[in-house]
Image (cartoon, rainbow, N blue to C red):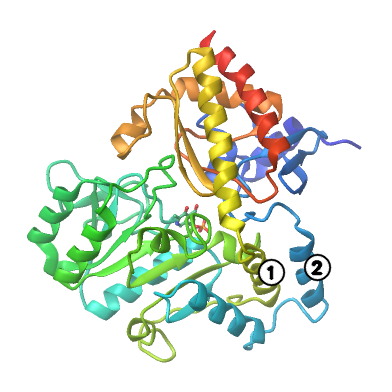
């Protein structure tokens, strides 16, 4: 019997909050019902009704080599037969740790976990434990997973005190998170001059992929590096999204800034549930069991997940992999901008290698406030028109888009063609 998206969503709503296991999947920001995936291959996703979509989300980042890549599937099959999980060390964990430290030189040691959220939670515990300080600094528009210390927004008035952004986050904990405007040099300087001695860590998405795709102003990441240095705070780059995507070595390679700790996820699991945090050996040695700062995981370093991740890391180290992706992203974004111009729609894009942002405003946002000020209603119309055309972009005006190496000339040309018709509908 063929299943329908609508029936599945209705059944899901009975037994799962909002019908989904992660909020953005419910299409709340764009309206309408989500589709249910049947399968995926290369640049394409098929729903349970057999409709095909060119996919610009790639499972929210992991599928940089395209869906169901034969080499990734083969690697998984090869280890699967030996057992799914052991609860004792396995050789693939060692290979993964060595690969990560080789690709990202700021990582002298790493710890594998099961999600990006776990990675960021563990990284701030490590920073707090190592510095003996309580305060965390983060940025408007950045997302670091759903840990309590991150679900905090800036309080009005006071620069330092945060307020809970979700019921269930204790006010006492929220007080310890300060939220700054991204790309604002002076606000960061001021905060550090006021409470620098309290700050355990500053955590930042070096390119903000959770508020569309906001690139750092020249020298901004260096400025944050210097402030942390001067005040003895741990600089954490959350590269869960940018890692291995905006360059092989992530945003830290692209911008030449060396954080103390980095967090990863998505690509390093090749589609399996994986995260990691790593950095300076002097910090990482303080993690249990070599040090006193506790962190653990039943399934951490799972052999099947390591195999998928290692196979993906191997693919992305092929010569020219990121250069080809970058060229494809430019072709796509230039094509979208031209299509918007033809239709008379105000539209711009930002890009960083295999990651891009689409803005219904004159120029790409450089701050969260600017991103929020874009024409969200126009985005919604565009999203639905593209979906109808069989092109799936993120169901939110505040999420980056992702390309994979499976997005070839044909897919990009078809996307730009679809966008021509979609922009015409937006303009109508
Ligand atoms: N950090 C960043 C930058 C992310 O984009 C995400 C998820 O999208 C996370 C952390 C959380 O990762 P996960 O969803 O695997 O918990």
Q: Residue furthest left?
A: 194
Q: Residue at 20% across / 73% down in the picture?
A: 133
Classify mark 1: helix, strand or loop.
helix
Task: Locate residue 52, reporting x and y percent.
Answer: 77, 35
Left or right placement of residue 341 versus residue 4 in this view: left
CB under 8 Å between discs 2 and 1: yes
Left or right placement of residue 9 versus residue 236 in this view: right
| Label at residue 396 | none
Confirm whether residue 248 shows in the render.
yes
Instruction: Tell me the residue that label 2 is attached to.
Output: 74
The residue lying toward the viewer, choosing from 18 and 215, is 215
Quadrant occupied by the C terminus: top right
Task: Locate residue 317, reporting x and y percent.
Answer: 61, 66
Classify mark 2: helix, strand or loop.
helix
Task: Locate residue 200, reporting x and y percent.
Answer: 23, 70
Q: Residue at 32% across / 64% down in the picture?
A: 257
| Up/down of 41 relative to 233, above or below | above
The residue lying toward the viewer, choosing from 129 and 167, is 129
Instruction: Tell me the residue that label 1 is attached to.
Output: 311
**Quadrant of res 269:** bottom right
| Up/down of 428 relative to 392, above or below | above
Asked if disc 2 is less than 8 Å from ligand 1, the answer is no
Question: Of callouts 2 and 1, which one flags the residue occurring earlier in the amino acid sequence?
Answer: 2
| Up/down of 58 relative to 170, above or below | above
Q: Residue at 27% across / 60% down in the picture?
A: 173
């Amino acid at each position: 019997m063929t299943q329908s998206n609508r029936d599945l969503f209705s059944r899901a709503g009975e037994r799962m909050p909002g019908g989904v296991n992660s909020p953005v999947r419910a299409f709340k920001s764009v309206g309408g019902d989500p589709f249910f995936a049947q399968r995926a291959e290369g640049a394409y996703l098929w729903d349970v009704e057999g409709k095909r979509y060119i996919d610009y989300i790639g499972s929210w980042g992991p599928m940089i080599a395209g869906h169901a890549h034969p080499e990734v599937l083969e690697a998984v099959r090869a280890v699967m037969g030996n057992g799914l999980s052991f609860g004792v060390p396995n050789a693939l964990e060692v290979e993964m740790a060595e690969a990560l430290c080789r690709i990202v030189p700021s990582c002298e040691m790493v710890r594998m976990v099961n999600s990006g959220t776990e990675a960021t939670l563990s990284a701030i515990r490590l920073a707090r434990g190592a510095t003996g300080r309580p305060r965390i600094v983060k940025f408007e528009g950045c997302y670091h997973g759903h840990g309590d210390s991150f679900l905090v927004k800036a309080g009005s008035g006071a620069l330092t005190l945060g307020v809970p952004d979700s019921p269930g986050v204790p006010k006492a904990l929220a007080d310890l998170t300060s939220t700054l405007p991204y790309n604002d040099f002076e606000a960061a300087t001021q905060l550090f001059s006021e409470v620098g001695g309290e700050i355990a860590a500053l955590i930042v998405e070096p390119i903000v992929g959770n508020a569309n795709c906001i690139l750092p102003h020249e020298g901004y990441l260096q400025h944050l590096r210097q402030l942390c240095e001067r005040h003895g705070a741990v600089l954490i780059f959350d590269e869960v999204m940018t890692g291995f995507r905006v360059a092989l070595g992530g945003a830290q390679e692209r911008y030449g800034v060396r954080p103390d700790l980095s967090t990863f996820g998505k690509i390093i699991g090749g589609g399996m549930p994986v995260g990691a945090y790593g950095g300076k050996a002097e910090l990482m040695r303080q993690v249990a069991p070599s040090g006193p700062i506790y962190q653990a995981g039943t399934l951490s370093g799972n052999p099947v997940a390591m195999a998928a991740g290692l196979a993906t890391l191997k693919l992305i180290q092929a010569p020219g992999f990121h250069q080809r992706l970058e060229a494809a992203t430019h072709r796509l974004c230039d094509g979208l901008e031209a299509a918007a111009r033809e239709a008379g729609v105000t539209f711009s894009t930002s890009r960083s290698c295999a990651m891009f942002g689409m803005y219904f405003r004159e120029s790409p946002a450089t701050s969260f406030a600017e991103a929020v000020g874009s024409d969200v209603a126009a985005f919604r119309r565009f999203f639905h028109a593209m979906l109808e055309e069989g092109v799936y972009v993120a169901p939110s005006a505040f999420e980056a888009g992702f390309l994979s190496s499976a997005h070839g000339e044909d897919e990009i040309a078809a996307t730009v063609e679809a966008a021509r018709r979609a922009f015409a509908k937006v303009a109508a």
